[in-house]
């Protein structure tokens, strides 16, 4: 009886994990306001069985000092856009910022995933920070992960990736999000996998 209930929990937890992995997610996805942060945008599948050959991550306004990971063999390029408010420094005026990063000429099979890494400085803010991720496949189809929750909290179609930004005091101190601590957000497939393993461990223990 106890065993059956535990197995049911394992099955439902693993099901949750696989449905969470169906979307593009940021890993890790819990960060501290105004800090430097590194995350990976995980593309979990292709388009109706076709491989992914192009990925574009749009940089939200206020995110600065963006540097992409050069993901071999993808061609990684940076697209600049004008800054709303140029930044005056002692050595000159900075007029542009990174608007998007493109990984092109890849071939990521539908039955595999890849992580597209970025490091950057977060704006001073709290709450969800949404990232639009465009995915193109070899059949010409696009999965544009751009939708954000409506007033009722429902997200239609392809949800944007999200980083949950908190104050240092509420998220465990400076750099809490970057230390590899388990991801506690709903959107982090990692946390669901961890909880799956935790339940499996609990099952194993309950058998003795
Ligand atoms: C690619 O997607 C098309 C639909 O756009 C589908 O008909 C085809 O079977 C897919 N190809 C592969 C290799 O899965
Ligand atoms: C930014 O724009 C200002 C005003 O047009 C110009 O003087 C400055 O040289 C520009 N900075 C750069 C780095 O291009
Ligand atoms: C997805 O985004 C790409 C790049 O901006 C655009 O060319 C394409 O038309 C979009 N497709 C859909 C279905 O929204
Ligand atoms: C974060 O800190 C700022 C400044 O102290 C405060 O105004 C804001 O309400 C805090 N936000 C949250 C979600 O705690």
Image (cartoon, rainbow, N blue to C red):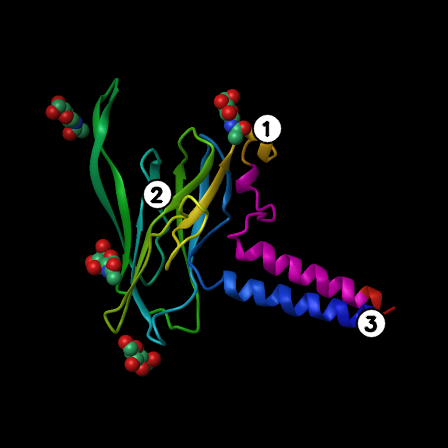
Residue 87 is a magenta residue: no
The answer to which of 48 and 41 lies nearer the viewer is: 48
Up the image or down, 59 lies above or below 203; here it is above
The answer to whether marks 2 and 3 mark residues whose Cβ atoms lie closer than 8 Å is: no
Most extreme residue toward the right is 208
User: Among all residues in the image, which is located at the extreme top?
Assistant: 90
Residue hosting label 2: 67
Q: Label 1 vs label 2: CA separation?
A: 27 Å
Let me know if residue 185 is in the magenta part: yes
Q: Quadrant of residue 55?
A: bottom left
Q: CA distance from mark 2 to mark 3?
A: 53 Å
Mark closer to the observer (1, 3): 3
**Direction from residue 124 to residue 170 in the image, left or right:** right
Residue with the mark numbered 1: 169
Would you call the spot at circle 1 few (<14 residues within 10 Å), some (14-19), or many (20 or more)? few
Q: Is residue 7 left or right of residue 54?
A: right
In this rendering, the answer to whether 132 lies above or below 80 is below
Residue beneath label 3, please? 1
Q: Residue at x 23, y 70 (%)?
A: 140
- Measured as percent of width and height from the top left, residue 163 is found at 46, 44
Residues at discs 1 and 2 in contact (Cβ within 8 Å) = no
Marks 1 and 3 sit apart, C-alpha to C-alpha, by: 43 Å
Q: Is residue 62 above or below residue 92?
A: below
Secondary structure mainly formed by the magenta segment: helix
| Image coords of residue 65 (percent x, y) | 34, 36
- Residue 160: numbered disc: none
């Amino acid at each position: 009886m106890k065993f059956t209930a535990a197995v049911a929990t394992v099955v439902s937890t693993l099901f949750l994990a696989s449905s969470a992995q169906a979307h593009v997610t940021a890993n890790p996805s819990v960060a501290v306001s105004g800090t430097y942060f590194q995350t990976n945008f995980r593309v979990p599948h292709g388009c109706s069985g076709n491989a992914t050959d192009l990925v574009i991550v749009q940089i939200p306004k206020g995110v600065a000092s963006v540097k992409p990971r050069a993901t071999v063999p993808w061609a990684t390029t940076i697209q600049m856009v004008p800054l709303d408010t140029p930044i005056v420094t002692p050595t000159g005026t900075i007029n542009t910022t990174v608007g998007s990063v493109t990984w092109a000429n890849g071939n990521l099979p539908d039955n595999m995933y890849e992580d597209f890494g970025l490091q950057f400085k977060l704006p001073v803010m709290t709450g969800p920070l949404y990232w639009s991720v465009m995915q193109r496949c070899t059949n010409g189809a696009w999965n544009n992960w751009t939708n954000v929750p409506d007033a009722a909290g429902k997200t239609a179609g392809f949800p944007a990736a999200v980083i949950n930004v908190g104050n240092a005091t509420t998220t465990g101190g400076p750099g809490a999000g970057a230390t590899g601590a388990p991801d506690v957000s709903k959107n982090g497939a990692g946390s669901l996998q961890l909880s799956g393993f935790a339940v499996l461990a609990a099952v194993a223990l309950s058998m003795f």
